[in-house]
Amino acid sequence: MAMATALAATAAERAVLEEEFRWLLQDEVHAVLRQLQDILKEASLRFTLPGMGTEGPAKQENFILSSCGTDQVKGVLTLQGDALSQADVNLKMPRNNQLLHFAFREDKQWKLQQIQDARNHVSHAIHLLANRDESYQFKTGAEVLKLMDAVMLQLTRARNRLTTPATLTLPEIAASGLTRMFAPALPADLLVNVYINLNKLCLTVYQLHVLQPNSTKNFRPAGGSVLHSPGAMFEWGSQRLEVSQVHKVECVIPWLNDALVFFTVSLQLCQQLKDKVGLGGLLGGSKDPCHTAKVPPDL
């Protein structure tokens, strides 16, 4: 008798848990998806390029370059959507205190691939969520887990594009189109690079000197790096060169900071939903073995 009562109680508890799990799949999941879409739409607005509709070209934003270590490089970068539309830079040469001024040619813009890629990943995440609108019924926890994994992958990639600048060799920097965008042309002993790091737009200026054929220095070409140090060597054309001075200046882009916050909050929401669904599947989803359920392949 006692065993029958216990079994009945266990069955009743399982029925309650399964009902709660169905509610989780049908109601709470969609509530979280709506919240995610709202947050990611806000994030996408930070990357939106006005001018794709009727609003005219993207507005220009001017940012003053600064450094806590040196005042040898000063200037202003002008950002227009995902492109640098102007760079106006002054460089004080340490040897003779000569002041060099260089700026973008008026017909040139420099696309910031990191911003473009981050925006594309956000758009992909929003598309994944939009494919599971209010009318869609999730039948298994595994479906939800797979969707969250796909969304989190796009958000992680978007965040990584802003937080992890590309590592470039010095010849790659020399060969980039950025070096040919300035008027007057950059002196042969200068290289410049521009990249995003977190919420900052960074400009690096490398001063170079030629290593003479009779130099006693052991020539070892530098590999890829986000920021090369003085002493780094490379070969360009018929010359061997060495970095003698490095100047890094930067400016904070407030809307990039907003975007990074939105990515973090969205990833936390995704993980919280995964944890709930995973726990719900263990407690009440006896008919929903998340690790074996078949899910649609269209994510």
Image (cartoon, rainbow, N blue to C red):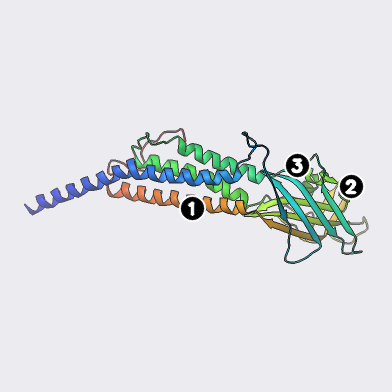
Residue at (44, 50) in percent of width and height: 269
Q: Which mark is residue 109?
A: 3
Specify the farthest residue to the bottom.
69
Give the camera-side residue of 53 and 76.
53
Residue at (36, 47) in percent of width and height: 277
Q: Nearer the viewer, mark 3 or mark 2?
A: 3
SS for dot 3: loop
Amino acid at dot 2: Ser
Q: Position of residue 94 (x, y in %)?
A: 87, 64
**Mark 3 or mark 2, earlier in chain:** 3
- Image-based side of 73 in relation to 131, left or right: right
SS for dot 2: loop
Residue 225 visible in image:
no
Amino acid at dot 1: Val
Amino acid at dot 3: Gln
Q: Residues within 10 Å of mark 2 (few under 14, many from 20)?
A: few
Q: Quadrant of residue 76?
A: bottom right
List the residue tagged with mark 2. Answer: 238
Q: Quadrant of residue 109?
A: top right
List the residue tagged with mark 1. Answer: 265
Q: Position of residue 166 (x, y in %)?
A: 68, 49
> How far separated are the C-alphas under marks 3 and 2?
30 Å
**Mark 1 or mark 3, earlier in chain:** 3
